[in-house]
Image (cartoon, helix red, strand yellow):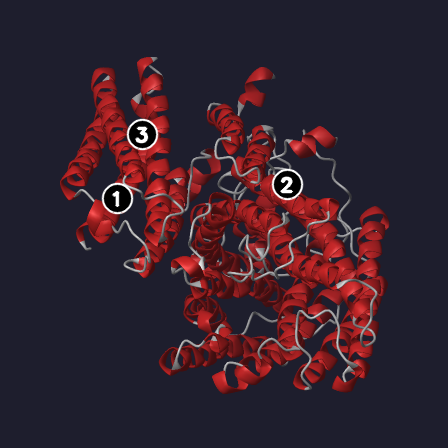
Amino acid sequence: MAEAAAVAHDDHHYTSTGLNSWKLGFWTLIGSECLFFGTLISTYMVYKGQSIVGPFSGEIFDIPLTTVSTFVLLMSSLAMVLALDGVQRGSRKLSMIWLGVVILLGATFLGFQVYEFSHFYHEGLGLDTNLLGSSFYVLTGFHGTHVFFGVVWLTTLWVMSARGKLPPSKALNVEIAGLYWHFVDIVWIVIFVLVYLIQ
Amino acid sequence: MSVATDTAAAPHTAHHGEPTGLWSWITTVDHKRIGVMYFLTSVFFLLVGGLEALLIRIQLFKPENDFISAELYNQLFTMHGTTMIFLVAMPMAVAFFNYVVPLQIGARDVAFPRLNALSYWIYLFGGLYLNASWFVGAAPNTSWVGYANLTSTQFSPGLNVDFWVLGLSILGVSSIMGGVNFITTIINLRAPGMKLMRMPLFTWMTFVTSFLLITALPVIAVALIMLAFDRFFSANFFNVAAGGDPVLWQHLFWIFGHPEVYILVLPAFGVISDVIPAFSRKPLFGYPVVVYAGVLIGFIGWGVWSHHMFTSGLGPIADSFFVATTMIIAIPTGVKIFNWMATMWGGAIRFTTAMNFAIGLVALFTVGGLSGVMHASAPVDLQQHDSYFVVAHFHYVIVGGILLGMFSGLYYWFPKVTGRYMSEKLGAWHFWSTLIGFNLTFFPMHFSGMFGMPRRTWTYQSELGVEFYNQLSTIGGFMLGVSTLIMLYNVIKSARSGAPAGSNPWGAPTLEWSIPSPPHHYNFPSLPEVRSREPMWHDAEREAIEAVTLAEPESEPVMPGPSFWPIVVASGVTATWALVMTGVWWVPLIGLAYTTFGVFMWAFEDPFKHLKSSH
């Protein structure tokens, strides 16, 4: 403990647990986000099958298509891990490649979602059509918004990397963006199972 | 008062390198200044909410009064409740979190100082936005619980509910960020040796409250989002014609709303758990039990929400479950009350104003707790629901519990903040006028409620026989108003010319009393090493700590510099939400673009740039 105390006197990066405060704070925020999505998902589940007029979920959901977009998002998490590895190794090339892949896959997922929304809309499902429209669009829309912010965030990191401003000493920035990205990915897996697969 | 004699008053130390002026407050990231701003803002809103209450009391002074219209009455009680909960009780507690917690754990600031400033500015702007509704004559009017589907555009077509749903969404952002900040601060920024089970109780309760903040607020956020989509974009969440269920709103609101009760009361419990030992000259009786009771309240607080909904018809099984959990949660609360009494037992008690308010809390909160256990029973609740009995109950909890705790904290920590005592003479006037005025206002409400006077109704008939009780309540209400003005006068007068106080004016045991009053902007020249729960009560430990904390350092610790991006981002967040009012989907994106700009500038700002430019 004496060693910890000595560190405390000199270094303002000292923390009681040894964990980085940004990382800890971000985990806390993710905890909060769990309740946020938990409430949205619960609302969807409560209203499942309660719509009075169609279109109903069984009529319009396209499971194969959403499976592909789910796969895309899952793979982006893999790329995220490799991007962090690249930054930690100090390889600008690997960092830029893998961050770029995450961004592309994230954007592809968003593209699927835009297609899906417009497709459903043309099938007659608006936000105001029935309970499915309200609870589906708001839940998946908020998830999509999270993905969008993730893409903006990662693009910022990509630009930093391209300018050589993402050395291994700043790997924590990428790690925290990765925490966010993986979290958003996991939320999608829950949504995919509860909303699409279990009808 | 003789309490000043145990520690020699220290001379006022000049503050090194601390800027002054309005701009320095706007850009400050210092947790102490943010705490002061939180407190002053919450007192301002206390006056606003109090004025609303007094107008209500004038209206109810006699039967069938026409002092104000039914419509204005609806706006007044809605804004009174919303203001007192979200703009007074919560932020006043956050004021103490800010000022006190870093000092108690031996930290130089919170973990995220700029985020802290952002929380404050969002709170201020959100509060102003909510109250701006008065100026367009459309204040929220569907009560602080805003039950669906009264809040639908069909039944509430005006701007009133728009202000409410958007204003509360803005405030929620502030609370969640505050929770994240304080959890991280308390876990990560404790001084060496400050183990969790050595933390002062106020820090502990801040910790528990912060967890409740980050978990309860997202639930109401989603409920508000759903309501906003219903109102602005014609979604169907609470549209009965489309199969929507208004009871869903009740569940979501109270899943937030009941933890919210503990968000409000646990900080007050924390304050008096520090005040009572300090003025009894005894360590807190059963420290671990008081900590665990607080944690347990935090957990069980999540399982009692439907006791607000016994009249909604959830069925006997659900009702029985929530009757049981509600009665169970009285146990840890009762444990705390007995621990406070046992702390005082045999202690050398000094009846300062801070201690008086703390004891007042123990007594009055117990009254509110007992009436709470009464309507924990579903059959009893069916009689009392929506009557003035319930109004009496929660005012005993919120005013008798929370506000008294906050006042106790004010008198206790004021010397630390300003280096001056508050006037004990005015304090006695403040305390006794509060105590008498409070009981005169709210005790008769038990009776008016029992005799059948409904809540949220703008007048009553003389045949109901509740005129006398209402007159008592109104007289008491005005006494409370006067007592608040006495407090305000005391704060202003004492800040200017109070008796100078030293570093530890009360002879209190915890770490915030080891540094000068007022503290340096960096709090601790170097971090002290803590070896016990009451470091200032063990002579050897105190001397070792004070050798570190009272020393004038040769070079000052490096602190993050001022930033104006928090206020920019806060204005952006508020503008984004407020622009949703237009009902055009792309208009809020303008606010979002502005916010994004602020966030990027913030992210790439070097908090230590002020050091580089001066060299």
Kindly tell me whether residue B202 is visible in this rendering.
yes
From the top left corner, tell me how far across and down residue B208 is, in percent.
47, 60
Please name the residue shown 52% across and 38% down the image. B115
Quickly name the residue at label 3.
A174
Mark 2 near mark 1, Cβ–Cβ under 8 Å?
no
A65 shown above or below B283? above
A99 relative to B526 in the view: left or right: left
Q: Chain of mark 1?
A: A
Image location of residue B341, percent across then percent down = 60, 79
- Quarter that holds the C terminus of chain B: top right
Q: Is residue B428 visible?
A: no
Mark 1 vs 3: CB contact within 8 A: no
- Residue lying at the far left of the rendered structure: A64
What residue would you read off at disc 1? Answer: A188
* Residue B97 position (above or below residue B396): above
Residue type highlighted by circle 2 = Phe
- Judge by depth and name the residue closer to the eye, B311 or B96: B311
In x, y percent, where is residue B257? 51, 63
Identify the residue position indicated by label 2 in the image.
Answer: B125
SS at mark 3? helix
Q: CA distance from mark 2 to mark 1?
A: 34 Å
Q: Earlier in the sequence, mark 1 or mark 3?
A: 3
Q: Which mark is residue B560?
A: none
**Same-chain status of marks 1 and 3:** yes
Quadrant location of the N terminus of chain B in the rendered image: bottom right
A123 relative to B271 in the view: left or right = left
Q: CA distance from mark 1 to mark 3?
A: 21 Å
Q: Residue furthest top?
A: A163
Q: Amino acid at mark 1?
A: Trp
Q: Amino acid at mark 3?
A: Val
**B527 relative position to B91: left or right:** left
Q: How packed is label 3: few (under 14 Cα within 10 Å), some, or many (20 or more)? A: many
